[in-house]
Amino acid sequence: MNAANEEIVLLKDGLRVDGRKPEELRPIEMKVGVLKRADGSAYVAYGETKVIAAVYGPRELHPRHLQNPEKAVVRCRYDMVPFSVKQRKRPGPDRRSIEISKVTKEALEPAIFLENFPKAAIDIFVEIIQADASTRVAGITAASLALADAGIPMRDLVAAVTTGKIDNTVVLDISGPEDQYGVADMPVAMMPRLERITLLQMDGKLSISEFKQALELAKEGIKKIYEKQKEALRRRCEIDDTP
Ligand code: ADP
């Protein structure tokens, strides 16, 4: 129920508000190497959620007392630009963006060979240019591509998606109205080849069997997103190969 107490129909005849089936992703776009100044960059869209990620480094970390002699330090900033939502978002960090910056960093770190770069910093910037839910997972997918584009050695890419429950149905890739009026949402990030989950959060309530179903659906979605990531990286290499 929304504030006006009208009933919002999120599923009609088995289809969602945007016409998708429960297990369907939104149209996904990916492009690697979109910024000239960054060492690595990527653009990712999950439907109307649009993100740019930029990576700088590995580079010497200043101030030096923050350096780790054993491995690189990852710093991550997630941010939504003021025009990313209908009502202008106040610029600058808030509790939500600080939390998402932290979980994004933690979702990506296990994939990076940090020990190859002692005393260095790897800086990851995620800018949400248009938000229609699932921004943290689109940001993680984009940041992982930007890390690969920067040539940073990784164990695997990280791909991410949100599953959740609307009405009585578990669905893949939550959009804006589903996030707002749905029962639960569950962002998941994973290194698909290694089958290692690096982020799992939940907002709302799921039964154990719904949770298992949501996790399986997330894994299937992540596999599809992973294939698109690899395609986007291949396209980037083809462009680089042209004389
Ligand atoms: P995620 O974007 O990862 O799903 P949340 O669940 O916190 O993270 O946010 C869900 C959605 O709510 C966002 O994707 C965005 O569409 C909307 N939203 C978040 N913050 C704001 C804001 N300050 N103003 C308007 N909409 C917002």
Image: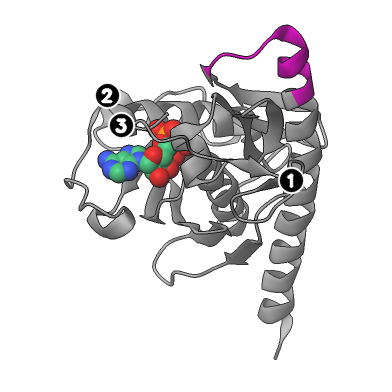
> In the rendering, at what x and y percent does residue 86 appear?
28, 55
Q: Going from the N terminus, do you reach mark 2 or mark 1 first?
A: 1
| SS for dot 3 | loop
Type of the residue with mark 1: Asp
Type of the residue with mark 3: Ala
| Residue ID for mark 2 | 65
Residue at 36% x, 26% y: name it. 99
Dividing the picture into quarters, in which one does residue 9 lie? top right
Q: Going from the N terminus, do you reach mark 1 or mark 3 first?
A: 3
Q: Going from the N terminus, do you reach mark 2 or mark 3 first?
A: 3
Placement of 91 over or under 5, stated as above or below: below
Residue at 41% x, 48% y: name it. 126
Residue at 80% x, 27% y: name it. 216
Dividing the picture into quarters, in which one does residue 227 lie? bottom right
Type of the residue with mark 2: His
- The reply to whether discs 1 and 3 touch (Cβ–Cβ < 8 Å) is no
| Residue ID for mark 1 | 13
User: Is 205 included in the stretch rendered in magenta?
Assistant: yes
Tell whether 144 sits left or right of 228: left
User: Of tags 2 and 1, which is closer to the observer?
Assistant: 1
Mark 1: C-beta under 8 Å from nearest atom of ligand 1: no
User: Is 139 included in the stretch rendered in magenta?
Assistant: no
Residue 70 or residue 200, whichever sits in front: 200
CA distance separating discs 2 and 3: 50 Å
Image quadrant of ligand 1? top left
User: Which segment did they paint magenta?
Assistant: 204-213
Q: Quadrant of the N terminus?
A: top left
| SS for dot 2 | helix
| Residue ID for mark 3 | 3
Q: Quadrant of the C terminus?
A: bottom right
